[in-house]
C-alpha cells in the first residue's frame, strides 16, 4: 500500500490570508531557518567544464545556423528557437481556443518563432491546475482547436499541444470541486494543497485520459503533443522520489515511477502510430530526497526506449519556490495584486507578506541559462532531440548552446511575452538580448486573465 504522499492532490479554494495561513507561513519560516532541507534546498551544481563552455566567447562545436529550419524529431520547425509552453490567460473560461489566443499565436508566427508549444491543457477536468488553459478532455473542443491550428499553419509554423494533469498541484478553485482542508503539516512538500493517494483505477483512468487527449490533439491538427512531465504536476509528481512515496508498481524504483509515462506511450502508439509525442521533464527539483540529474539522465534513456520524440529539459516544482521560473527578486507586489489567494488580504497581512514570504520561499540562482548544463548531460546520453528552457535571454548564448552541441533547440517563455517578434529581431540583429528582466509579474497575472509583460511595474 502507498503511504500518504500520493502523487495526486485535491485542492481547495481560499480567499485572502487566513490566520491559519499566517501561522503556517510563520512556522514554515522558522522551520526553513532551522531545517533548511525540509523545505527543499538541496542544490544542483552544474559541472565546471560545462560552465567553462558556456563562458567561452565562441562555440566549440559545429556552428549551426540557429535560424535555419530543423527537425524536432519528425516535426519540421522554422528554426531552433521555440516558444516554450506558456499559459497566457487568454482562453475562454470553458477551455476553448478563441480568437484572442489565435491572435497571440499569429503574432508569434509573424515574429518568426520556430514552433509553438501551447500552454498546458488539462486532460481531465479534475486535473486542472491553471486558470484559462486550453482543455482537450472532451471532443467538443476539437473544432475550435482545429481553427486555431489552421491559422498557425498558414505561417508554416508547427504547433504542439502541451497536455497535463495537475496532480498534487491541481487546484479545486478551478476544478469546481468541494474544498478540502489543507494539511501542510502532513505534507512537508508544501504546495497549498493536500495530496490524495490515487487508486489503481484512477491511475488507469488518467492514462486513458492522456491517450484520449493525444488522439484529439491529432484530430485537431496539432503537429504533436508534449506531455507535461515537469514542474511538480502529476507525471513529474510520479517521477520524483520526493513526492512519489508509493510502494506498489507505480512507486519505488526509477522504472516503477516511470511506469505511468511508459503506459501512456504504449497505449497512445496503438492509436496514433508515429504521431509526435514529446515530453518536458525536470532535470532536478531541489528537494532533499527529490529528483537528481543522474536519475533524470536514466529517465531520458527510458523515454527514448519508450518512443519519445524529443525531451525539453526544465527544473523545479512549486514547493521549491522560484526555481522553474527564476526571478530577480521576490515578486511580493505582484503576488499581492494578482494572486487569487492574496489579493483580498487584510491590510496587516499585506504589510507582513513581503517580509515573511521571501524568508519562506526559496529563490534560486543563476538567473540565466539555468538548465543548459543539465540538458547537455542528458543530450550526451540519448539520440533524440533535446530542447532546453530556462533563463535564455541572449542571442550569443543561443549560438553557444546550439553550436556547442549542448542542446538541439532552445525554448523561451517570458522573452516571447516581452517581445513576440524576438526571433526576427535576433535574426536581423536589431536585438542581441531580450528585454525581459525576469520580474515574474507575468506569471502572477495569469490568475487574473490575460498576461502581458509588466517589466517589473504594476501599472
Ligand atoms: C506566464 C507563464 C506561464 C507559463 N505556463 C506554463 C505552462 O503552461 N506549461 C509549462 O510547462 N510551463 C509554463 N511556464 C514555464 C515556462 O515554460 C518556462 O519553463 C519558464 O518560464 C522558464 O523559461 P523562461 O526563463 O524563458 O521564462 C510558464 C511561465 C510563465 C512565465
Image (tube, grey):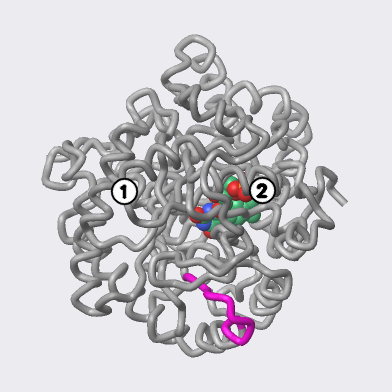
Residue 17 belongs to the span the image colors magenta: no
Residue ID at (72%, 31%): 329
Part of the protein shown in magenta = 152-160
Q: Position of residue 383 (x, y in %)?
A: 32, 53
Where does the image place residue 316, in percent across and percent down from the top left?
A: 47, 38
- Name the secondary structure under disc 2: loop
**Most distant residue in the right direction:** 459
Which quarter of the picture shows residue 428?
A: bottom right
211, above or below 46, in the image: below
- Number of numbered labels in the structure image: 2
Instruction: In the rendered structure, find residue 339 and report the number of the disc placed on it.
Output: 2
Q: Is residue 213 above or below residue 377?
A: below
Q: Judge whether residue 35 can be spotted in this image.
A: yes
**Quadrant, the N terminus:** top left
Along the line of sight, the residue nearer the viewer: 225 or 376: 376
How far apart are the alpha carbons under marks 1 and 2? 40 Å
Camera-nearest label, 1 or 2: 1
Q: Position of residue 403 (x, y in %)?
A: 56, 47
In the depicted structure, whether residue 326 falls above or below residue 355: below
For label 1, the SS is loop
Q: Residue at x 35, y 51 (%)?
A: 234
Residue pictured at 73% horizontal, 35% vertical: 332
Q: Nearer the viewer, residue 396 or 191?
A: 396
Give the mark, 1 or 2, whose residue is nearer the N terminus: 2
What residue does disc 1 label? 382
Inspect this view and state whether residue 86 appears: no
Q: Residue at x 54, y 83 (%)?
A: 149
Q: Is residue 156 magenta?
A: yes
Q: Nearer the viewer, residue 164 or 412?
A: 412
CB under 8 Å between callouts 1 and 2?
A: no
Residue farthest toward the top in the current orientation of the protein = 34
Q: Is residue 154 left or right of residue 344?
A: left
Amino acid at each position: 500500500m502507498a503511504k500518504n504522499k500520493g502523487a495526486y492532490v485535491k485542492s481547495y479554494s481560499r480567499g485572502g490570508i487566513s490566520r491559519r495561513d499566517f501561522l503556517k507561513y510563520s512556522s514554515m519560516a522558522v522551520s526553513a531557518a532551522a531545517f533548511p532541507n525540509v523545505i527543499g534546498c538541496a542544490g544542483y551544481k552544474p559541472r565546471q567544464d560545462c560552465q567553462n563552455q558556456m563562458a567561452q566567447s565562441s562555440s566549440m562545436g559545429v556552428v549551426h545556423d540557429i535560424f535555419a529550419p530543423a527537425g524536432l524529431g519528425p516535426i519540421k520547425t522554422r528554426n531552433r528557437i521555440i516558444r516554450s509552453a506558456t499559459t497566457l490567460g487568454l482562453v475562454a473560461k470553458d477551455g476553448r481556443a478563441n480568437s484572442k489566443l489565435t491572435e497571440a499565436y499569429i503574432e508569434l508566427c509573424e515574429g518568426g518563432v520556430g514552433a509553438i508549444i501551447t500552454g498546458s491543457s488539462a486532460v481531465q477536468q479534475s486535473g486542472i491546475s491553471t486558470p484559462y488553459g486550453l482543455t482537450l478532455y472532451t471532443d467538443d473542443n476539437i473544432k475550435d482547436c482545429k481553427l486555431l491550428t489552421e491559422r498557425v499553419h498558414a505561417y508554416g509554423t508547427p504547433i504542439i499541444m502541451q497536455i497535463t494533469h495537475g496532480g498534487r498541484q491541481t487546484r479545486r478553485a478551478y476544478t469546481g470541486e468541494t474544498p478540502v482542508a489543507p494539511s501542510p503539516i502532513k505534507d512537508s512538500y508544501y504546495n497549498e494543497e493536500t495530496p490524495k493517494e490515487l487508486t489503481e483505477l484512477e491511475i488507469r483512468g488518467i492514462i486513458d485520459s492522456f491517450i484520449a487527449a493525444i488522439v484529439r490533439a491529432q484530430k485537431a491538427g496539432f503537429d504533436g503533443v508534449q506531455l507535461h512531465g515537469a514542474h511538480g504536476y502529476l507525471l513529474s509528481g510520479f517521477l520524483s522520489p520526493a513526492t512519489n512515496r508509493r510502494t506498489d508498481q507505480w512507486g519505488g524504483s526509477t522504472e516503477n515511477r516511470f511506469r505511468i509515462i511508459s503506459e501512456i506511450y504504449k497505449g497512445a502508439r496503438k492509436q496514433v502510430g508515429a504521431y509526435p509525442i514529446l515530453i518536458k521533464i525536470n532535470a532536478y527539483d531541489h528537494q532533499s530526497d527529490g529528483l537528481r540529474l543522474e536519475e533524470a539522465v536514466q529517465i531520458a534513456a527510458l523515454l527514448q526506449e519508450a518512443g519519445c520524440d524529443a525531451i525539453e529539459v526544465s527544473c523545479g516544482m512549486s514547493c521549491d519556490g522560484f526555481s522553474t521560473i527564476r526571478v530577480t527578486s521576490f515578486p511580493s507586489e505582484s503576488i499581492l495584486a494578482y494572486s487569487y489567494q492574496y489579493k483580498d488580504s487584510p491590510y496587516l497581512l499585506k504589510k507582513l507578506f513581503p517580509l515573511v514570504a521571501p524568508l519562506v520561499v526559496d529563490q534560486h540562482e543563476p538567473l540565466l541559462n539555468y538548465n543548459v548544463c543539465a540538458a547537455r548531460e542528458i543530450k550526451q546520453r540519448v539520440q533524440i532531440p533535446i530542447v532546453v528552457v530556462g533563463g535564455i535571454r541572449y542571442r550569443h548564448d543561443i549560438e553557444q548552446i546550439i553550436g556547442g552541441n549542448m542542446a538541439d533547440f532552445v525554448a523561451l517563455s517570458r522573452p516571447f511575452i516581452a517581445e513576440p517578434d524576438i526571433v526576427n529581431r535576433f535574426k536581423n540583429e536589431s536585438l542581441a538580448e531580450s528585454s525581459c528582466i525576469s520580474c515574474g509579474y507575468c506569471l502572477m497575472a495569469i490568475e487574473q486573465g490575460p498576461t502581458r509583460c509588466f517589466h517589473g511595474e504594476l501599472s
